[in-house]
């Protein structure tokens, strides 16, 4: 049994978690997530403000997480921190804090790749969400389709060529005048839309594609975003029944994005003979995505696992779980550990 305390500060959530266990047999003892509200007024994350907010709250968040876990700092065996990818200033706060803890307690430090954390996150709630599986990670900064052969053995199949799925949701929502972050607001608005009132082309998706083609798994959302924005501009001119039209546009946008993600995931599942799909990242909270994914996978005999909101968005529990895996493999970091804005996922295979 190993007890891990993990720190996650890659973007705008200050999070600390305590987890203990061995292999896939783990128990999450506590998870504290402090979402930085300050960015709302700016309509996006302001990096410098994020770093400062992490700096002032990390100690209180850590103490709260320890309190809730019922464990003492002295009983922690390993300290883990996200060291990339993300906002460098924000990451440095968590990395520096975890280093100080590891040094003061004389315990090992483990570095975790944020997206590898997302791969592990869902397994904390669903015991079956373990390799082999097809993973779709959809967040504000990333859209990755990965074949997970085993923990630590990842085949990166596809990614976005431009905007991430969450970023597309946020940008379209902003143009619709919805609050930031726009994803959940746009999903809510889409529920009032009429399916078929409007249709956008599914980006990077056509029958002529075959495995081996560079666009077989990749996605692209910037053209879709531009198409939506131009419809919004036309509607402004027509001054139509704004509420109604907005909901139709929101639904048509969401359908195009969801269809694309679902089809690419189905291709990955079939090509690699998997029977499980694991979703992660903030957009995994989208109920329309989950429903469409389940409907498409069921006839293929595959189960779909999605994390709850708390574990879908950024959190330290997934970092603790991935940290445990690396610690068990002996991947320990030195006190010279650095943070990186972009960083390849460890364990990539071709
Ligand atoms: O994983 P996450 O918390 O942070 C990043 O690492 O980016 O993801 C945040 C993203 C935002 O773009 C947000 O709009 C999106 O996830 N999101 C959603 C929903 N809930 C969160 N997008 C669509 N539908 C939702 N229900
Ligand atoms: Zn994330």
Image: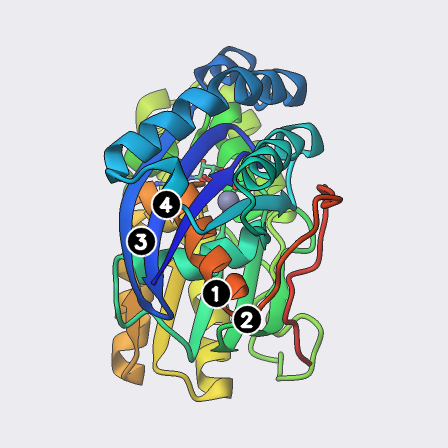
Label 2: element kind? loop
* Local crowd size for mark 4, using a 10 Å CA cut-off: few (<14), some (14–19), many (≥20): few
Say whether residue 276 is visible: yes
Foreground of the two, 309 or 2: 2
Question: What is the CA distance from the residue labelled 4 to the residue labelled 1?
Answer: 19 Å
Q: Is residue 47 above or below residue 66?
A: above
Mark 2 highlights which residue?
Answer: 329
Mark 3 highlights which residue?
Answer: 307
Mark earlier in primary sequence (2, 3): 3
Residue 178, x across and y down, in percent:
42, 22
Considering the image in quadrants, where does the C terminus appear? Answer: bottom right
Question: What is the CA distance from the residue labelled 3 to the residue labelled 4?
Answer: 29 Å
Residue 299, x across and y down, in percent:
26, 81
Q: Is residue 204 above or below residue 149?
A: above
Foreground of the two, 244 or 104: 104
Mark 1 highlights which residue?
Answer: 325
Q: Is residue 293 left or right of residue 217?
A: left
Residue 82, x across and y down, in percent:
57, 45
Mark 4 highlights which residue?
Answer: 75
Q: Answer yes or no: do the residues labelled 1 and 2 have beta carbons within 8 Å?
A: yes
Q: Is residue 191 left or right of residue 184?
A: left
Report which quarter residue 253 is drawn in: top left
Label 1: element kind? helix
Mark earlier in primary sequence (3, 1): 3
Determine whether the beta carbon of the residue marked 4 sits less than 8 angstroms from the nearest atom of ligand 2. no
């Amino acid at each position: 049994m190993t007890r891990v305390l993990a720190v996650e500060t890659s973007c705008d959530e200050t999070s600390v978690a305590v987890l203990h266990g061995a292999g896939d047999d783990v128990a999450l003892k506590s998870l504290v997530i402090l979402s930085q509200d300050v960015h709302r007024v700016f309509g996006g994350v302001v990096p410098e403000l994020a770093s400062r907010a992490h700096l002032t709250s990390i100690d209180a968040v850590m103490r709260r997480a320890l309190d809730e876990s019922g464990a003492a700092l002295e009983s922690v065996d390993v300290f883990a921190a996200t060291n990339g990818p993300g906002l460098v200033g924000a990451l440095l706060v968590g990395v520096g804090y975890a280093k100080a803890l590891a040094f003061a307690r004389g315990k090992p430090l483990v570095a975790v790749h944020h997206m590898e954390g997302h791969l592990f996150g869902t397994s904390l709630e669903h015991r079956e969400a373990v390799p082999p599986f097809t993973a779709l990670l959809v967040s504000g900064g990333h859209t990755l389709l990965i074949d997970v052969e085993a923990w630590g053995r990842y085949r990166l199949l596809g990614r976005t060529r431009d905007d991430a799925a969450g970023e597309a949701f946020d940008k379209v929502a902003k143009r619709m005048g919805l609050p930031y972050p726009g994803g959940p607001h746009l999903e809510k608005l889409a529920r009032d839309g009429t399916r078929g009132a409007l249709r956008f082309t599914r980006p990077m998706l056509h029958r002529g594609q075959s495995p081996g083609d560079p666009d077989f798994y990749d996605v692209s959302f910037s053209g879709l975003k531009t198409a939506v924005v131009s419809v919004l501009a036309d509607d402004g001119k027509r001054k139509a029944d704004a509420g109604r039209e907005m909901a139709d546009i929101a639904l048509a946008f969401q359908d195009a994005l969801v269809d694309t993600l679902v089809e690419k995931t189905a291709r990955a599942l079939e090509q690699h003979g998997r029977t499980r799909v694991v979703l992660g990242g903030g957009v995994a909270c989208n109920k329309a995505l989950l429903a469409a994914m389940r409907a498409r996978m069921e006839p293929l005999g595959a189960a779909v696992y999605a994390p709850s909101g708390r574990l879908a968005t950024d959190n330290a529990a997934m970092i603790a779980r991935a940290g445990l895996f690396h610690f068990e493999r002996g991947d320990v970091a030195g006190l010279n550990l650095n943070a990186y804005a972009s960083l390849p996922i460890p364990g990539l295979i071709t």
